[in-house]
Every structure is written in C-alpha cells, then in structure tokens.
Amino acid sequence: MINIDLNGKKGIVFGVANHRSIAWAISQKLLDAGADVTIAYQNERFKSGVEKLIDGYSNASLEECDVSSDDSITDLFSNLKDKYQNIDFLVHSIAFAPREDLAGDFSETSRESFNIALEISSFSLISLVNNATKLMKNGGSILALTFQASQSVYPGYNVMGVAKAALENEVKQLAAEYGSREIRVNALSPGPMDTLAARGIHGFIDMKKIHAEKAPLKRNITHDEVGNAALFLCSDLSTGITGTILPVDAGYHIMAV
Ligand SMILES: NC(=O)c1ccc[n+]([C@@H]2O[C@H](COP(=O)([O-])OP(=O)(O)OC[C@H]3O[C@@H](n4cnc5c(N)ncnc54)[C@H](O)[C@@H]3O)[C@@H](O)[C@H]2O)c1
C-alpha cells in the first residue's frame, strides 16, 4: 500500500489513448491518491474509450487537445484555468512518428516525417509547459516520458530516437528556466511496454524479450511500476529533484552487454 496523499492537488495528464497507455497507468495513481486530474485525449476517436476509463472517478474529467494545433492547446488551457484556476502537475505522455519511418534505414527518414515526429513528440513539451506554468502559481511538477533510444541505437526506433534526445534536452533547459519558481521538470525513461505506440515499432517484441533477459531484475517492468514512479515525481516527496531522467527499466540501462 503506497501512501501518497495528493488531496487538494490539481493537474493534467496528456496521452491517454486506451487502458494500456502509460498515461492511464499514471492517471490512475494520481486519481487514487486523491488529486483532481484532467485527462487530455487527442481527438474524438479516443473520446468514448477514455470516458469509460474514468467512469467512477469523481475527481477525473476530460478535455480534447491535439498538440499539433496552437488553437487546440490555447482552448484547453483556457478551459483548465476556468476549471482549476491553479494547477500543480502536468504529465506529457505523447509521441508520434509516421509508421513507415519506424522501420528500415534511418537515413531514409523524410523531411516531413522528421518534422512531424519532432513537432508532436518534442516541441509539444515546450508549448504545453509554456502554457501550464502560467497556471502554476505555487510551484509544480512537470513530467515527460522518454526512452533510452535517446542515447543508444535501437534498430527500428529511428527518428523517434532523435525526438527523445531533443525531449531530454528540453527537460533540462526547462528545469533550469523554471527552477526559481519551484517548478520541477523531469522525465521517466521506462523499458519497453505493450502499448498502442509501441506496436508501431518494428522489432518491438524482440526488444522487449532482450530487455527482460539482460536487465539486472531479469524481467520487464510493469505499468504499475511506471505509475508509482510518476506518482513520486508528481508529489512533494520529490521536491529536491529536477532536470532528471529517471530510468524505470529494471536496471537495463547499466548493462554494457
Ligand atoms: N511503450 C513503451 O515501450 C514506451 C517506453 C518508453 C517511453 N514511452 C513513451 O511513453 C509515452 C506514451 O506512449 P505509450 O507507450 O503509452 O503509447 P500510447 O499510444 O498509449 O500513447 C501515446 C499517446 O500520444 C498521443 N498523441 C499522439 N499524437 C498526438 C497529438 N497530435 N496530440 C495529442 N496527443 C497525441 C496519442 O493519442 C496517445 O494517447 C510516449 O512518449 C512514448 O514514447 C513508451
């Protein structure tokens, strides 16, 4: 039983597509800890599924937001301001690259795919943080989701490795910029997990198997474990931590071979 009390805290989680989404594992932990959570889904296609997920949570509500649109982001934060006035946390659990570029030779990445992947997966953090911090009057915690392909080559991850490298640098620059306001910016770097986004990565099943074999804990990580780490980083238990990329990968990142 984990005893973190987020009663009175309010915030927003981006990136719930379905029950397998890392963002949903995180949302559940935040909701169960008593926080008021707005869940932002990408578009109409996800609405009814996400509505079913939050059924029974009186502290959960929904907003639609497509991060490729400035208007959509502005509308969302305007609604959030009306609803909460002040927020304490933001979780960015969003990534996208055209499927054809998540396989084959990296050097074949097109200009268009590069721009889309970086815009949706990396630039969006800057834009969301810029808006969210206007509502963080008493400090706050911002959390992004990254992957070790930012540092090492994972065949098939291709342009998403570039997007994650950019995202991790953003985490550090934003942490430096907002630290004086007690706003912390960190990222979790989970090992491979079965989700909608992961299914688009060529060779994902093998990657997951290799992780489990090589990791010190000799297994893959669970949604629950990532949710718990996120809960810690969104709570006041982690007030001394900012600009950090925290691996939640059963220790895989320390292994050379
Ligand atoms: N699954 C893994 O193995 C793994 C490992 C490490 C990190 N991550 C990261 O975790 C995060 C969440 O991914 P996931 O694995 O839970 O998959 P997911 O498919 O459940 O989540 C990805 C989310 O991004 C959203 N999204 C895409 N384009 C968007 C747009 N234009 N506007 C708003 N939202 C948009 C989707 O709607 C979806 O909710 C991503 O950043 C991913 O890179 C995943």
Image: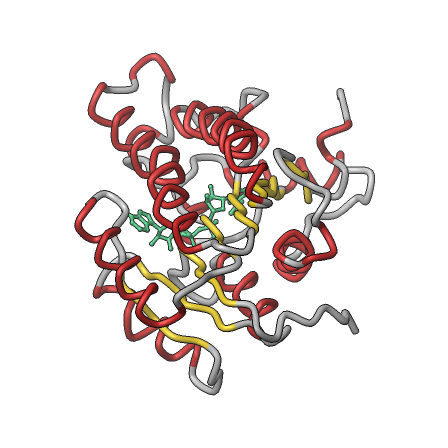
Image side of residue 121 versus residue 100, left or right: right
Relative depth, front residue between 234 and 150: 234
Residue 122 occupies quadrant = top left
Q: With respect to residue 180, does 101 lie above or below?
A: above
Q: Where is residue 194 shown, x and y percent of the image?
A: 52, 53
Image side of residue 77 versus residue 237, left or right: left
Point 49% across, 33% down: residue: 174
Q: Where is residue 236 shown, x and y percent of the image?
A: 69, 57
Q: With respect to residue 126, does 195 lie above or below?
A: below
Residue furthest to the right in view is 216
Q: Where is residue 25 shown, x and y percent of the image?
A: 56, 63
Point 56% across, 29% down: residue: 176
Classify the position of the C terminus by image quarter.
top right
Relative depth, front residue between 82 and 234: 82
Q: With respect to residue 118, does 213 lie above or below?
A: below
Classify the position of the N terminus by image quarter.
bottom right
Point 56% across, 50% down: residue: 141
Point 73% across, 43% down: residue: 240
Relative depth, front residue between 61 and 133: 133
Image side of residue 239 versus residue 151, left or right: right
Q: With respect to residue 241, does 60 lie above or below?
A: below
Residue 227 occupies quadrant = bottom right
Q: Where is residue 106 shown, x and y percent of the image?
A: 38, 17
